[in-house]
Amino acid sequence: GVGTEGKLQFVDMAASDVAPVPKKENFDINKSPDADDTHFSNKSIDAFNDVVNARCQFDRSVPYRNSTLTHLLRDSLEADAKVLLLCCVSTDQADLTDAIGTLRFASRIQKVSIGKATKHIVGSKE
């Protein structure tokens, strides 16, 4: 028979920009809390931002291989894909900075031009 083929990917990036809380046994008062651990927790989101920036500027070279996340999402961020981004923000005053950052990120994502989504028809070879 004939059918269509597609891919559905869910990526939860919640709190990916939040610095990890140091464990008591590894806690060093002389070490900055935003040193190595924060760098690694932000690597995927930074790489994703690099891809978004390159796509917004229509760069020929898009750095998909800079992280596992962007490498896996490459085919969803190119040519004939349909992308839906859900952003959840809090209305609490204490979360205002995070909410503004999330909305700015969503605004940048909205500027990415991916192209027209196409139907991928798959048929049996008889």
Image: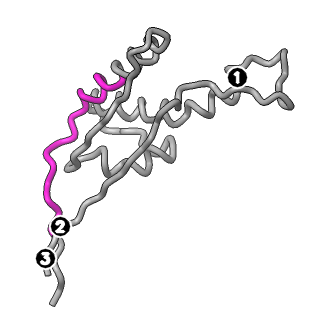
> Residue 51 shows which numbered tag?
none
Residue with the most extreme front position = 92
Report the residue marked by disc 3.
2
User: In the rendered image, which quarter contains the N terminus?
Assistant: bottom left
* Position in image of residue 46 (x %, y %): 49, 30
Q: Is residue 83 above or below residue 57?
A: below
Amino acid marked by disc 3: Val
Secondary structure of the residue carrying numbered label 3:
strand
Does 112 sit left or right of 74 as displayed?
left
* Position in image of residue 82 (x %, y %): 21, 46
In the image, which residues are magenta? Answer: 105-121
Amino acid marked by disc 2: Thr
Q: Say whether residue 15 is magenta.
A: no
Q: How many marks do you count on the picture? A: 3
Which residue is found at the position 52% from the left and 30% from the top? Answer: 15
* Position in image of residue 53 (x %, y %): 35, 28
Q: Quadrant of residue 85?
A: top left
Which is nearer the eye, 43 or 99?
99
Which is nearer the eye, 50 or 19?
19
Disc 3 residue crowd, few under 14, some 14–19, many 20+, Cα 10 Å: few
Give the Cα distance between marks 2 and 3: 7 Å
Secondary structure of the residue carrying numbered label 1:
loop
Asked which colour scheme the image uses, the reply is one colour
Which residue is found at the position 51% from the left and 43% from the top? Answer: 67
Amino acid marked by disc 1: Ala
Which is nearer the eye, 121 or 53?
121
Does 44 sit left or right of 113 as displayed?
right
Q: Earlier in the sequence, mark 2 or mark 1?
A: 2
Report the residue marked by disc 2.
4
